[in-house]
Amino acid sequence: MNSLPSNVTIVEVGPRDGLQNEAQHLSAQVKIDFINQLSCCGLAVIESGSMVNPEWLPQMANSEEVIKGIHQRPGIKYPVLVPNEKGMQRALEAGAKSVAIFISASEGFNHKNLNCSIEQSFTHFDPVMAIARDNGIEVRAYLSCVMGCPFDGKVKPMVVATIARRLIELGCYEVSLGDTIGIGTPLQAQRLIQAVSKQVAIEQLAIHFHNTRGQALANIYACLELGITTIDAAVAGLGGCPYTDGSSGNIATEDVIYMLHGMGIETGVDLRALSETGNMICQQLNRINSSHVGKLYR
Ligand code: MG
């Protein structure tokens, strides 16, 4: 029997990564209620908004209002996605105490998503990190396309490892490794973690897997075997990837938690309360809940 962790931290990304990829736009008040309800589920991290230019991302246009409106409970992080210095300033003014930056492990996706090269992205991070340091704000990093890119194809684990190490050296407390198009399989996920954990402490790595091809839970399990203890997931499986045809979204948080609790791994999350929250937001979106567990609590 291999050794699995006794505790896992769930990073709930539904209110940002999830909702930004849903066709329907929600009001600030619905999002505030959603995040406040998630705050009562025992989650330690709830990604709450994005300061990406609203012209590119209309679903997140009300993020400032949302951040100002939520009840930020002590002990819970509410990271806000920031693309650049301007976004960082907006996040700060809205009262964010935690932010997330993002970059891709593939040039093709970085150009499509950020309109610049990977190296240019790093130069954009410098002023963001300086503002964060001056204001005591924690910075998380998303590294996307870690197991493949819709434009460039294969992505080498060594490339992922090098970028991840640079993000930690910049001052990020954690790097979230995103299988943005849900293309990876379990042994590939293990090879990735083996390569990256040679350059970054495994405690500073999170995994962010999409379920496009039904591999996410298997990939998560494979990474748990190697000591990963932080998992990104979106309640009700909200979201997806706008550049991938018909892609299903993020792995549903309820399904991840069901698997973890079933294996005796603690998360601190109240699965029933979380499922009810997932069902609530699906009703608001007039959408089917892609969580299997969520369906049981209807
Ligand atoms: Mg995602």
Image (tube, rainbow, N blue to C red):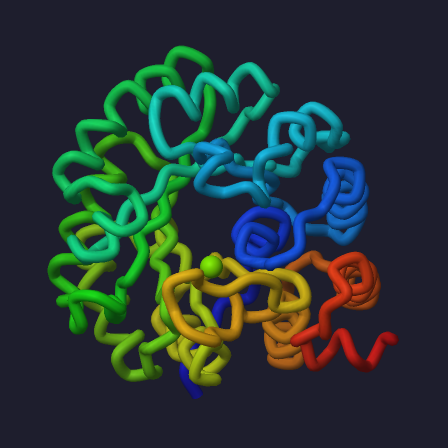
From the top left corner, tell me how far across and down residue 31 is, in percent. Answer: 73, 43
Can the viewer see residue 155 in this picture?
yes
From the top left corner, tell me how far across and down residue 95 is, in percent. Answer: 60, 20
Q: Is residue 11 left or right of residue 167?
A: right
Q: Is residue 84 above or below residue 268?
A: above
Q: Identify the residue at horizontal 27%, vertical 63% (top origin).
A: 146
Can the viewer see residue 9 in this picture?
no
In which quadrant of the rendered view does residue 274 lie? bottom right
Q: Identify the residue at horizontal 39%, vertical 74% (top origin).
A: 182
Residue with the most extreme right position: 298
Q: Is residue 23 left or right of residue 54?
A: right
Q: Quadrant of the C terminus?
A: bottom right
Q: Is residue 12 left or right of residue 219?
A: right
From the top left corner, tell me how far across and down residue 166 is, in percent. Answer: 18, 40
Q: Quadrant of the N terminus?
A: bottom left
Q: Identify the residue at horizontal 49%, vertical 67% (top origin).
A: 5
From the top left corner, tell me how far across and down residue 113 is, in percent. Answer: 31, 48
Q: Is residue 172 above or below residue 221?
A: above
